[in-house]
Image (tube, rainbow, N blue to C red):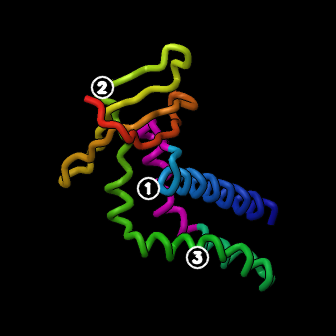
Amino acid sequence: MIIKRYISLFLNSIFFLILLLFVLDAFTDFDIKNQAIKSFSYVGIIIITPIVLIWNLWFFKRLKTKTITTIVPLLTLVGILAIHPIKIIFSSASWQTQKVVYQNKHASFQKIEYQIQDVGALGYNKRTVEVTYLTNWFMIVHPVKKQYK
């Protein structure tokens, strides 16, 4: 019984970490620069959501606990199906900097960059954004209003 509890804690912790990274990257200005972390969160959300949902339905015996622990995975599964798993996988490529258009002399972590994203057979997405690097793996991006070349 203790082993099942640790497995449950581990699965749910990994699920919430992946969900947090996915939601931050997909729906906010927070961006994941590292391709391995981005692929882990985008592909991981598709794989681990049904696993956690089934595990929580099987492991928890009390109806109240079972209901509470399956709401988030169930809503996540509905969201994945609404967005479509193929679209999620195609958007799992990280943005690559092609050219630094401007770099702040006083704050070296703030830049304006021209970036591209490889979306497989669909070609490339291109953007020019103001980037604030939090670490080498994570950044905050804002669209640039003025066109830089």
Q: Residue at x 35, y 46 (%)?
A: 93
The label shown at residue 74 is: 3
On the image, the x and y values in percent for residue 76 come to 55, 70
> In the rendered structure, which disc, 3 or 1, sits on the residue that comes first in sequence?
1
On the image, the x and y values in percent for residue 20 come to 60, 54
Q: Which residue is drawn at 51% across and 36% down?
A: 139
- Give amino acid for label 1: Val
Q: In this view, does 124 lie above or below 110?
A: below
- Give amino acid for label 2: Lys
The label shown at residue 114 is: none
Query: Is residue 101 highlighted in magenta?
Result: no
Residues in magenta, as a range: 31-51
Q: Residue at x 19, y 54 (%)?
A: 122
Q: Check disc 1 and report the residue beneath it.
A: 43
Q: Name the quadrant of the N terminus.
A: bottom right
Corner quadrant of residue 81? bottom left
Q: In this view, does 94 lie above or below 54?
A: above
> In the rendered structure, which disc, 2 or 1, sits on the residue that comes first in sequence?
1
Q: Check disc 2 and report the residue beneath it.
A: 99
- Which element is circle 1 on? helix
The residue lying toward the viewer, choosing from 105 and 3, is 105
